[in-house]
Image (cartoon, rainbow, N blue to C red):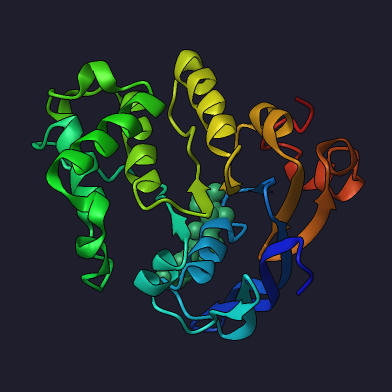
């Protein structure tokens, strides 16, 4: 694994009762980049995320993170190592306040009591950290409101804040813009760019104009296989990519 690569999949495959959802995927995510994983519905994008973060075990293949083999690692261990994912479906606690949602995330033990012993986990420090995260996602003015009251796009921003609470080195975002209106899309895209200044981002996203705008590298999946990889200008001209998207979405942003 060269030092530029922070996360790598080699020959990654996953079958579900004989159905091959992910087929011999090779993926190399370079440190400090925004890397997008795109492809039609059912291409295997979320399954790749589940494999990379230990939520699913691969049928074949290996996963390397910072040079370590994490193929069989548990989700909590993977997260503790700094590889953290968000989910495609919204996952906030609706009855807790916006601030409490972030505090809960900051206190998440991740299968060890280690975090409780960190000096900055004192109550005031926790409160300050939570506020800083809310500032980062533009939610500070909603801190005291129940999370369930947030409009959809702001809820997704809160989820990004709870994910950032784990201080990931590599952040995996599954469709961070799904279901958002124009204004939230712009805000969230700007947030992803800010967040990526200090870490690596791997994201699954169907909004191709944002993908084109944000990504250094794009990997296109189709029926579980890598169809193309490169910068947007290259993959968007690839005839196989255009064909994979015909009838579903325009590939030209
Ligand atoms: N637990 C499972 N059991 C059986 N089949 C599954 C399972 N998870 C995913 N699949 C199948 O694997 C394929 C890939 O699914 P996946 O969710 O990874 O696609 P995706 O690219 O994320 O699609 P979308 O863009 O719709 O989110 C689909 O055909 C799906 O039905
Ligand atoms: Mg998916």
Which residue is more in the foreground, 102 or 238?
Answer: 102
Pinpoint residue 52: horizontal percent, then vertical percent. Answer: 54, 68
**Residue lying furthest front in this view?**
119
Q: Is residue 39 visible?
A: no
Quadrant where the C terminus is found in the figure: top right
The residue at the point 76 percent across, 46 percent down is 217
Q: Position of residue 81 (x, y in %)?
A: 46, 68
Relative to residue 69, is residue 237 depicted above or below? above
How many marks are shown on the rendered structure?
A: 0
* 15 on left or right of 236: left
- The one nearer the camera, 194 or 74, is 194
Residue name at image x 71 percent, y 38 percent: 215
Q: Is residue 18 above or below residue 88?
A: below
Residue found at the very far left of the displayed protein: 95
Which x, y percent locates residue 228?
83, 54
**Residue in view at x 71 percent, y 28 percent:** 213
Quadrant location of residue 214? top right
Left or right of 229? Residue 160 is: left
The image quadrant where one finds the N terminus is bottom right
Residue found 17% across the figure and 24% down from its top: 149
**Residue 209 drawn at (x, y percent):** 69, 26
- Is residue 64 in sight in this rendering? yes
């Amino acid at each position: 694994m060269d030092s530029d690569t922070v996360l790598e999949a080699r020959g990654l495959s996953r079958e579900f009762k004989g159905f091959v959802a992910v087929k011999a995927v090779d993926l190399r995510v370079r440190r400090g980049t925004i890397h997008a994983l795109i492809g039609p519905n059912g291409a295997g994008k979320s399954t790749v995320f589940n494999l990379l973060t230990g939520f699913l075990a691969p049928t074949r293949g290996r996963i390397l993170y910072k040079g370590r083999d994490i193929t069989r690692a548990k989700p909590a261990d993977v997260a503790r190592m700094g590889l953290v994912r968000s989910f495609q479906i919204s996952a906030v606690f609706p009855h807790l306040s916006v601030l409490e949602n972030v505090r809960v995330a900051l206190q998440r033990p991740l299968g060890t009591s280690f975090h409780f012993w960190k000096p900055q986990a004192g109550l005031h420090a926790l409160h300050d950290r939570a506020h800083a995260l809310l500032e980062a996602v533009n939610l500070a003015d909603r801190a005291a409101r129940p999370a369930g009251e947030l409009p959809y796009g702001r809820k997704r921003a809160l989820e990004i804040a709870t994910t950032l609470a784990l201080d990931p080195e590599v952040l995996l975002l599954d469709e961070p813009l799904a279901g958002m209106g124009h204004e939230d899309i712009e805000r969230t895209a700007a947030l992803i760019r800010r967040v990526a200044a200090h870490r690596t981002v791997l994201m699954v996203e169907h909004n191709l104009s944002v993908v084109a705008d944000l990504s250094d590298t794009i990997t296109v999946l189709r029926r579980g296989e890598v169809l193309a990889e490169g910068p947007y200008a290259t993959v968007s001209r690839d005839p196989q990519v255009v064909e994979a998207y015909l009838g579903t979405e325009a590939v030209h942003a």
